[in-house]
Image (cartoon, rainbow, N blue to C red):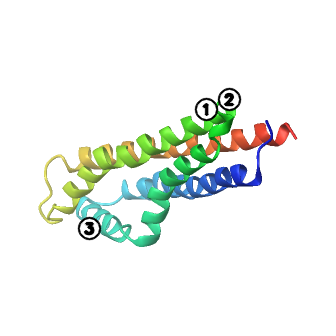
Amino acid sequence: MKTSYFENGTLAIALFIIGIMSGFFYTYTINVNLAMLEVSGEIYATVQSLFNENVRHFIFFIFFFGGGLASVIALIANIKHYKTISFWLIALAGVIYIFGIIIFTAQVNLPLNYETESWNPQVLPENWEQTRDAWNQANALRLLFSTLSFVLYIIVLVIRASKK
């Protein structure tokens, strides 16, 4: 069954948004987190709290939640292809993003963010390094999930391009 520009366009938009988020998680995991391992607890607590506060802005929220919304829109726009592998890859990419990024963040990263934001940098809890490490591991999982979703959208577009 032939796909329309609209159907593929919704995939391209989802791919773009999720690619931005994957790049965000990559940069944080591969650069920021590694640098933050080298600083004292006082600096870590201060800077991590600043990161958490400053990431809460309109553009970030558009991309963060937009990956889930764009995935749903892409799935709906491509519903007539429900008998194809590409449709189920679209569904899988969306499920991975929604559960692996949005819900996972709410359940894992946000509680850790709130914990670090409650710290007094001059009097850190004894387990501050474990909290830091848990946050870094959770962010690495978000990198994995966002990249997997991104790659699945690429695969769908490649499959479709190869059929023309």
Up/down of 78 relative to 34, above or below: above
Q: Nearer the viewer, mark 3 or mark 2?
A: 2
The amino acid marked with disc number 3 is Thr
Tags 2 and 1 touching, CB below 8 Å: yes
Residue where numbered disc 2 is placed: 85
Up/down of 144 relative to 15, above or below: above
Camera-nearest residue between 39 and 121: 121
> Which image quarter holds the C terminus?
top right
Q: Rounded to the nearest whole Å, what is the CA distance between mark 3 and mark 2?
A: 47 Å
Residue where numbered disc 1 is placed: 88
The answer to whether 28 appears left or right of 122 in the picture is right
Camera-nearest residue between 102 and 160: 160
Camera-nearest residue between 59 and 90: 90
> Can I make out residue 30 in this image?
no
Q: Earlier in the sequence, mark 3 or mark 2?
A: 3
Q: Nearer the viewer, mark 3 or mark 1?
A: 1
Q: At x 58% / y 45%, what residue is drawn?
A: 76
Q: At x 47% / y 70%, what residue is drawn?
A: 59
The amino acid marked with disc number 1 is Trp
Q: Rounded to the nearest whole Å, what is the CA distance between mark 3 and mark 1?
A: 44 Å
Residue where numbered disc 3 is placed: 46
> Which image quarter holds the N terminus?
top right
> Can I make out residue 104 in this image?
yes
The answer to whether 159 appears left or right of 153 in the picture is right
Q: At x 32% / y 64%, what residue is drawn?
A: 52
Q: Position of residue 91 (x, y in %)?
A: 56, 37
The amino acid marked with disc number 2 is Ile
Q: Position of residue 126 (x, y in %)?
A: 14, 48
Q: At x 24% / y 50%, what residue is drawn?
A: 111
